[in-house]
Image (cartoon, rainbow, N blue to C red):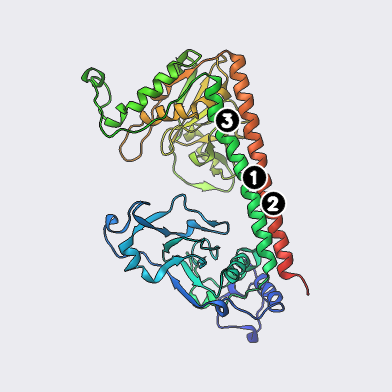
Amino acid sequence: MECFTVYSDKIEGRIDPYFYMPEFVELEEKVAKKTNKKLGDFIISISSGATPSRKKDEELYTDEKNGIPFLRVQNITENGLVLDDVKFITKEVHNTELKRSQVKEDNLLITITGRIASSCIVPKGFEGNINQHSVVIETKDRETAEIIATFLNSKTGNTLALRRTSGGSRPALDYSALKSIPVILNEKIVSLMDNAYQQKKQKEQEAQKLLDSINDFVLDELGIKLPELEDKKCFVVNSEIVNNNRLASYYYQPKYAVVEQALNRGKYKTEFLKKFIIKIHYGVSIKNEYIDEGIPLLRILNLKPNMFNLSDVVKLDESKRKEIGNGFVYEGDILISRSGSVGIVAVVPKEADGFAFGSFMIKFCVNDEINKEYLSIWLNNQISKLLTEREKIGAIQGNITIETIENFKIPIPPLEIQNKIAEEVKNRQAKAKQLQEESKQILDQAKQEVEKMILEKK
């Protein structure tokens, strides 16, 4: 609850208290001393996207080879277009129903719902389209668009945009509100942020290179050579192989036999995981009633390959402890995802000791004959992941069972080799994490500098 007074001569059309919050008014006054320009002053043309009215997805969407990128809010970021999960619409839809929202090089893109006012410039040679949650703007030149995008991505610019949102559960910017955002043109902030993004990208690439090297390092240490693999559309399976086994065709893809052969030719004998397991059971299925303080609950999103992300752990009421029963983990236990992103494995750290864990995971404990960290590393390796994918059951959302986990094949080198592998992987992950932190610091420092440059006194 916050109370403040607004004089009648300060009312600007909006009558909702949010618009007149003191921090908004104070910032607006500071910016007004530096500029009288609004975003609308730089717009030559503006258009919002749409979702086509076609009923069937096959009439709307297609593949990358035959389609046009259809940008959603998650694809438009302050760091440029992110196309990892972009959808593709047909060229017919692009040139008919969505003709007015076509996106071309040097256009300015701004999100108007969800992640408000995230902005970027369309790269050279790009052609695409947007949905109704973003707008495409043409300015007089690319330089102007870059300055505006950098300003809107700053804390100052984003706050000015947020002030102008309307709508209860899903705030949005309409054209009038968007055009009214004050804009400070400072070309220096563009070069500053460009340099920061380049440094950030370089650090992230170095970190990813380290993480990507782990797979090959582990296979080299184990003497396993994996040839090129491919999915075949046509292949023959002898009836005696299928007898008393799975009937799903993908289970018998020839590539899996190649993977198993590579595993068997390695330097070390393989054992079934059940030889080392001393305890194994499913997580707790409990109603999603989260509170601010209580029993921490691990979900699949907290589980990462060989590590945990504990930044977004939800809490359950203490009264649920009896209902949870044995659905707790302790330092040194191992968790594996059994549904959704199947086969992600990590050893429980001290920080998660005593946490509950959800039903989409399985916990198991192993004896001292195997290094827990090595086991986690192997189960996250490319070969193990392939064989885990093969074992999934269920049509809609594949999952694995306790029996599946018990029958995982594990190469067992001497403990000193296991320890060596675990230590080296740990070091590489630590270096990668440090580089990721450095990349974040570079960007944070640049953003702080941008705020000073935007609001500095002349």
Please give left or right for residue 398 compared with residue 308 in the image: left
> Residue 187 placed where, x, y %?
67, 68
Please give left or right for residue 72 compared with residue 447 in the image: left
Whether residue 168 is situated above or below residue 308 in the rendered picture: below
> Residue 179 placed where, x, y %?
54, 77
Q: CA–CA distance between discs 3 and 2?
A: 31 Å
Kindly identify the amino acid type of the residue bearing the numbered disc 1: Lys
Q: Please give the residue where the numbered disc 1 appears in the rendered image.
A: 203
Please give left or right for residue 101 compared with residue 426 in the image: left
Residue 96 is at least partly visible in this image? yes
SS at circle 3: loop
Q: Please give the residue where the numbered disc 2 appears in the rendered image.
A: 442
SS at circle 1: helix
> Residue 343 placed where, x, y %?
45, 32
> Which of the 4 image quadrants contains residue 247?
top left
Q: Residue at x 67, y 62 (%)?
A: 191
Question: Is tag 1's residue or tag 3's residue first in the polypeptide sequence?
Answer: 1
Residue 347 is at least partly visible in this image? no
